[in-house]
Image (tube, rainbow, N blue to C red):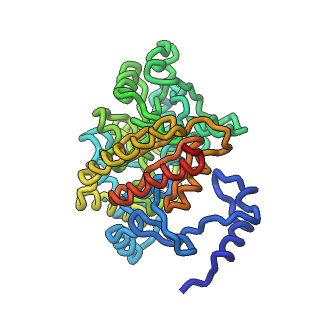
Amino acid sequence: MRNWTTEELIATDKRFVWHPFTNMREWCAPGHEPLVLVAGHGAILRDSRGREYIDGNSSIWTNIHGHNHPHINAAIRAQLERVAHTSFLGFTNPGAIQLAAAIVDLLPAESLTRVFYSDDGSTGIEVAVRIAAQYWQLRGIERHAFVVFDQAYHGDTAGAAALGAATMFRSPLDDWKFPVRRVRDAETLNATSARDAERVAAVVIEPLVQAAAGIRLWPSGTLRAVREWCHRHGALLIADEVMTGFGRTGRMFAIEHENVVPDVIVLGKGLTGGYLPLAMTVVTDEIFSRFDGSVAEGRAFPYGHSYTGNALGCAAAKASLEVFANDNVLENLQPKIKQMRRELAQLDQLKAVAEVRQCGFVAGVELRETEIVDVAAKVCLAARGRGLLTRPIRNIIVLMPPLCITPEQLSDAIVAIRDAIVEVCGQ
């Protein structure tokens, strides 16, 4: 039994809530009715007025197996009956231990072996850059710079934002602590002078595809070329798999496509199947071995959060990995990847479409420049009226549904995008 109405919820939201990446003047305008999402099952979400939608962006790229998955629900309930959360500072818990072992077992053998927990992708990257900086400090080597790629986005916390968000979103704050050098591609990286290369602590890259850059695909072999550059110059390689991890590219991790083993991998978003905030930064034994003392000695890693290693999040994540194994998720995904490519190709026939890009089960439909203001946002709003929820990146419409979406639902999503483009842009 509910004790609210849609009107009451919206009025209260507009009075008290501040939403991320949102023009709050427009949001709070009297004529604007925000969508209030109240329930979900599989790839479908339902709003407070009973309307149903395909979750076309996996609830901001997090949901993997669908909403209300019975196995993950049961794992969370079972953990809740024991304990919801205990400190990870000086203590541990079975869920965090078992999850760490399970993740390491999925990664290339005898490579990435130590798991540091955090709360989300941004804090996972924050952990990675801090570890990399301190690693060189502990070795007594002057390496302070981080190399990132143009249009990269690695999160919004201060250190992570230095790698891309501060530039991408025109932040007025310039001093983000970590010195960053931006390059365009692997060729530009290879042109780095020997003197500059000696100062690089790590290169950070989103393998295969830059997500927030607009589903921007890397040329084949880019990740391998970056790995080889790091080997030659002694820099660490940090793979940001916050979005690409857990099946998004058609394999469990994007690094598998080019058989690359990074020194650090960051996982988040889909780690818990889209249920709870949890991230991890996984490093090699070589990196871990340098942190061999206390905080007072400067040889421990002085970083951590109140909810690090949260038992409920770890239970959800472990259950999500079990779903992958029990339901043959990656095998069953392959026909849907082909279907997505085949049906999205039809959008190339629309004059308003500049390019369709796809990597595994991740796609972006780029619209041509037009006089229509916020054209992609208007297309997404029109798609909502056709039963599809997604969110644009500038003039790119993103399609990144849960891996469990049915072939029929996938077709419906692509038709909704096509019809919405025609409605807004004409043909």
Relative to residue 322, is residue 11 depicted above or below? below
Residue at coordinates 43% horizontally, 34% vertically from top-left?
217
Residue at coordinates 61% horizontally, 84% vertically from top-left?
3
- Residue 117 in the image: x percent, y percent? 44, 52
Residue at coordinates 62% horizontally, 45% vertically from top-left?
375
- Residue 123 in the image: x percent, y percent? 52, 48
Residue at the far bottom in the pictured view: 1
Relative to residue 32, is residue 131 depicted above or below? above
- Residue 425 in the image: x percent, y percent? 59, 45
Q: Is residue 317 left or right of residue 19?
A: left
When asked about the image quadrant of residue 35, the answer is bottom right
Relative to residue 292, is residue 85 depicted above or below? below
Residue at coordinates 46% horizontally, 60% vertically from top-left?
55
When asked about the image quadrant of residue 229, the answer is top left
Q: Is residue 90 visible?
A: no
Residue at the far front in the pictured view: 427
Relative to residue 369, is residue 89 depicted above or below? below
Q: Nearer the viewer, residue 184 or 200?
A: 184
Q: Is residue 15 visible?
A: yes
- Residue 124 in the image: x percent, y percent? 48, 47
Q: Nearer the viewer, residue 289 or 225?
A: 225
Q: Is residue 241 left or right of residue 33?
A: left
Quarter the C terminus occupies: top right
